[in-house]
Amino acid sequence: MDPFLAQLELTIARWHGVTAPNEPARRMAADLANTIAAFEKLRGTLKFEDEPSSFDAVLHDLREVE
Amino acid sequence: MPDLADLTLVEAVQAARDGTSSRALLAACWHRMEAVNPTLNATIWVDRVRAEAAAVAADAARDTPASLGGLFGLPLAHKDMYYQAGKPCTCGSRLRKDFVPDYTATVIERLSSAGAYVFAGLNMAEFAQNPTGHNREFGDCHNPWNPDYISGGSSSGSGAAVAARFVYGALGSDTGGSIRLPASACGVTGLKPTQTRVSRYGAMPLSFTLDNVGPLTRTARDCARMMSMIAGRDPKDPTSSHLPVPDYEGALDGDIRGTRIGVPTNYFFDGADPRVRAAIDQAMEVLTARGAAVRPITLPLMDAVSGYGGIISRVEAATIHAEWMRHRPQDYAAHLSGRMYPGYAIPGPYYLESLSRRGPVLRDFAAQVFAEVDVLATPTIRTALPTLAETDIDNGPAGTEVKFLAVSANTRPFNYLGLPAISIPCGFDGNGLPVGLQLAGRPFAETRLMRLADAYQRDTDWHARKPPVLDMARDLGGIIVA
């Protein structure tokens, strides 16, 4: 088994008590490598936030005014 | 004289106020349902006894103030994930096949207060977790335009039932496109409201951060009527917005002059089917003729929007389903447990980053986009609609998941951004299946979106066309004349 996937399965079982239910689960878990790659591309775009951000506040600030 | 089932939602309410009995409306819907549902499989349960009682009560209230309700006497049916005390709520799943809630969702109570009642629970993807309408437990939902094709999901029965005209309007839910996708696939109108605009109390959760409740209807005017009834602050849902609800329906005046519409040059048309692209271009010509200004626009931050949104939905679904995933994983369809499983391996900092970046990403996106345009126009589904077989992720060959996931590529971004988006029919693909035009705006721009959709529907008839399944209903004698 791919070492990355084997490590994932161990981690999930240890932390959550969930085992891979089927082959699609293993296939999609292995695909987390692509998720990591996507996050790697975003690194450096995250600025330190001095204040806690509120998504709801942004929604209201940017609302359409008729 | 028209079949009562063919009336729009607004027309049906007016008919009820003018003297058509609610029992006649219910009978028309029921008769149509019996004719088309063997083909569509759009329902999970039906309840004629209680619906008849509600219809009788509505008819008895005709000369009282109750008849002023915006949905007076209207039989409705919804995606089977809205809790109603004492009624089944399967969530499309084996795990909740026998679940009977002891309280009622706020949106159901609000529709009831407006005069509507429920006669069926509609088919849906298991736990609202696929974009196609496949369902192992209750059977796949089929498209009214061609039963070999997907109905879209996860509000599959809502889209199919509204298109087949056996329900005047239906609630769906939208975490990554689940209202807009069946609206597009079935040729009806579907609105995902701004995050926080509609209460989610009593609606089965999939992702606390990304879930939305909204209507599927035949027309934008019907959509506005339903939104007027369900939107607004709900003390039972602390995440719901305090902003007042505008007069959505009153704003539908056909005047879209000066509206700035942006057609994205990146992401939303990547690999788009040429017929889909042409349908969107033609729709832009219609809106331009009404006074809108259409221009191309390059959208920022799409990698962040896609990446962060995917993290949140996977982690939250995995969390909500953790107990069943530990003890009853075999009771999920394979694609469903398979998709949730990786959610347990996503690190907490990734999830928190995705959450904490949501506001700043929206602020930056809006600053760059809504300074230039008022509305974005994209295909709801960028490819030609696939068949059920082509997207049968549990039984198809390797690679099936690519087509499966491509269905929702254009809808998911607006869930992370929290923006309102509507899908309206705007043509047909090469196989004769509907194409949806997705219009998205800034937060709380539902009025503008529905005004645009209504203006478009004044000049086109895509929304009024009848799917072939209705010919079958006619052949089976399923048409009632009042």
Image (cartoon, rainbow, N blue to C red):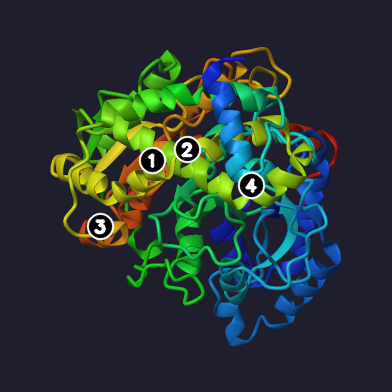
Ranked by sequence position, the earlier of labels 4 and 2 is: 4
Give me the C-alpha separation between circle 2 and circle 1. 7 Å
Q: Quick one: label 2, few (<14), some, or many (20+) residues within 10 Å?
A: many
Residue located at (38% from left, 19% from top)? B278
Q: Are marks 1 and 4 in contact (CB under 8 Å)?
A: no
For the point 65% across and 21% down, which residue is it?
A: B387
Marks 4 and 2: CB-CB under 8 Å?
no
Q: Nearer the viewer, residue B460 or B268?
A: B268
Q: Is residue B409 left or right of residue A57?
A: right
Do callouts 2 and 1 point to residues on the same chain? Answer: yes
Q: Is residue B150 left or right of residue B222?
A: right
- Mark 4 and mark 2: Cα distance apart in space: 33 Å
Of the residues tagged 1 and 3, which is closer to the observer? 1
* Residue B403 position within the rendered picture, expressed as x and y whole percent measured from the top left: 55, 19
Instruction: Characterize the local packing of mark 4: few (<14), some (14-19) or many (20 or more) Cα atoms within 10 angstroms.
Output: many
Question: Do badges 3 and 4 share one subunit?
Answer: no
Residue type at the position of mark 3: Ser
Residue at the spot x=75%, y=56% of the render? B120
Q: Secondary structure at mark 4?
A: helix
* Amino acid on which the number 1 mark rests in the picture: Tyr
Quadrant containing the C terminus of chain B in the rendered view: bottom right
**What chain is tagged by disc 3?**
A
User: What is the number of the mark on residue B350?
Assistant: 1
Q: Give the CA separation, mark 1 to mark 3.
A: 16 Å
Amino acid type at mark 4? Ser
Query: Mark 3 = which residue?
Result: A53
Q: Which mark is residue B346?
A: 2
SS at mark 2 in the image = loop
